[in-house]
Image (cartoon, rainbow, N blue to C red):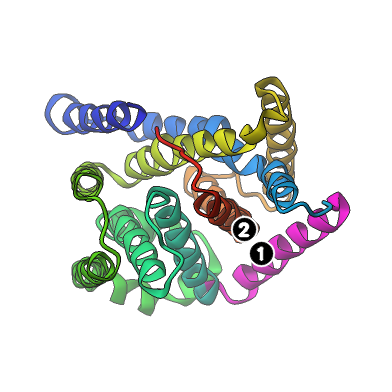
Amino acid sequence: MIKILMLLSGALLSIVHIWIIPIPVQVQTLLFLVGILLLGIPHGAADMLVANKTTMLNKKPFNYFLFLFKYLSKLLIFALILWFFPVTGNILFIVIAAYHFGETDLHQFNTQNISGKLFVLSYGLVILSVILLNNFDVLIPMFNEFESGRANVSLINWISNNRYFIMSLAGFQFFIFCFAYFVLNPADEKQTGNFLFQFAFILLILFNLPMLLGFSFYFIFWHSVLALKNIVNFLKIDRDISSITITKQIILYSLLAIFGIVIFGSIGFMFSTQNTMIVYVFLGLAVLTAPHLPVMHQMYNEIRRKKISLSV
């Protein structure tokens, strides 16, 4: 039911923007930032709770300090990669984010084998290619706000000139890996049909929305909501933690993350213009995704292993 409501909301958003009144950039930015604060960051703020639960289910002790050390180390390492090797860092981010998006949306399928992992990755790459490449003209001024963007202008122009070819390539590889997956891993026909319809609907919405609205719809109102729902259901296994406790913990870690983002953003003058602020938020999400992915990956592995139902 949640998925249906979100798809209908996305369709309504597209209709309003295309046929009724274009949504101003200022409103798009506000929706984006508010969504990041209310849903985007909180869905990653539960990582310690998820890691603790995964460890408990495997009947092993959980070391909070060791988890924090590893988590912050991954965050710092990826931040350094983005700083010193921006092109490599952004490519890694796209791959990591694509896999994470795919694993969340396709958790109902058995994706632990090679064909499943390629299926997951190719799914996420199509989603990101439609959001980013279809609106690449909007991204170019944002890149130019930074020295690394100006230093890689040739690469940026090449991507801009070949964006629809790259999008087509992403779609082609998804078709190949999707076909291969269902040949090697036969699934329930109804489940497969629902997935293909849902995927086509999402792409249609994203293709008709500008970049900020498209990213807000998919990352905030689709991915983050579904991920939070999955996380809460996972944490409630064996009913050893209450909804109130989960909510308090998520709010606490979300506030800490927001505080850190504001401090570093202010030091780096990342709030001086709208473009630098948006890019900074994307970079912040990129850095946070690096330690977030392994935690969620372990959660979904546990869900598949124990055949836990996460129907939404």
- Residue 287 is labelled as 2
Q: Nearer the viewer, residue 151 or 205?
A: 205
Q: Is residue 221 above or below residue 95?
A: above
Give residue 107's position: percent from left, percent from top.
42, 51
Which image quadrant for residue 202?
top left
Identify which residue is drawn at 24% across, 56% down.
134
In terms of secondary structure, what is the magenta stretch mainly? helix
Give residue 61's position: percent from left, percent from top.
84, 52
Q: Say which element carries label 2.
A: helix
Which residue is under mark 1?
Answer: 79
| Residue type marked 2 | Val
Q: Is residue 172 above or below residue 298?
A: below
Q: Nearer the viewer, residue 74 or 5?
A: 5
Q: Are marks 2 and 1 in contact (CB under 8 Å)?
A: yes
Which image quadrant for residue 220?
top left
Q: Is residue 84 magenta?
A: yes
Q: Residues within 10 Å of mark 1 (few under 14, many from 20)?
A: many
- The segment highlighted magenta reads 63-86
Q: Is residue 29 above or below residue 156?
A: above
Q: Say which element carries label 1.
A: helix
> Upstream in the sequence, badge 2 or badge 1?
1
Does residue 156 appear to the left or right of 134 in the view shown? right
